[in-house]
Image (spheres, grey):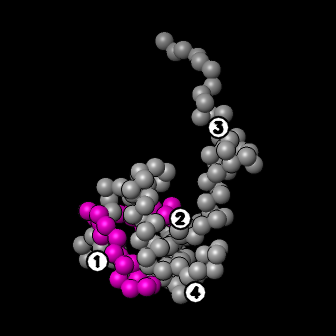
Amino acid sequence: MVAISTPSRLSRELRASSDCHWSPISSSSSFVNLYDTLVFPTPDGSVKPNVAERWETSADGLTWTFYLRKGVKFHDGSELTAEDVAFTMDRIIGIGEGYGYMFSGKVAGSDVVDAYKVRFNLSEPYGPFLITLVRLYI
């Protein structure tokens, strides 16, 4: 037996709106316009450097080290450092809301190596880690 019901709330929310309080699609666009990420998605599904100019992964896949571009500024003119990146990762996991679910239980910790080098220590190898960083808005 098939029952017909009224349209779901989700289908109504997918309509576009310029009011970021109404449409989850528009509010996600606000992040991209206000914040930067370590890496940026490309049309082919890979990522390219953004705030991070390069990165290295340990052989076991548990340690990811990112080298930040120098001279990246916040809106107030202060320079972005590895401390800001580590703080952002730790905070998004600590809050446990929004995109935090993408990192919670996967990132065991963040280390500031120097002013322009940050290291993420994973609890286990996580193949999609690099692509999830397109949602770590700094």
Query: Does dot 3 land on a helix, a strand or a loop?
Result: helix
| Number of the front mark, 3 or 2 | 2
- Range shown magenta: 108-137
Mark 2 belongs to which amino acid? Tyr
Alpha carbons under labels 4 and 1: distance apart: 27 Å
Can you tell which mark lies on residue 137? Answer: 2
Query: Does dot 2 land on a helix, a strand or a loop?
Result: loop
Pointer 1 local density, CA inside 10 Å: few below 14, some 14–19, many at least 20: few
| Number of the front mark, 4 or 1 | 4
Closer to the N terminus: mark 3 or mark 2? 3
| Residue of label 4 | 71
Q: Residue 124: x and y, percent? A: 25, 62
Mark 4 belongs to which amino acid? Gly
Alpha carbons under labels 3 and 1: distance apart: 42 Å
The answer to whether 44 is drawn above or below residue 92 in the figure is below
Mark 3 belongs to which amino acid? Glu
Mark 1 belongs to which amino acid? Ser
Can you tell which mark lies on residue 13? Answer: 3
Q: Residue 9: x and y, percent? A: 61, 30
Closer to the N terminus: mark 3 or mark 1? 3
Which residue corresponds to the image point at 68% horizontal and 48% vertical from the top-left?
Answer: 20
Query: Does dot 1 land on a helix, a strand or a loop?
Result: loop
Can you tell which mark lies on residue 58? Answer: 1
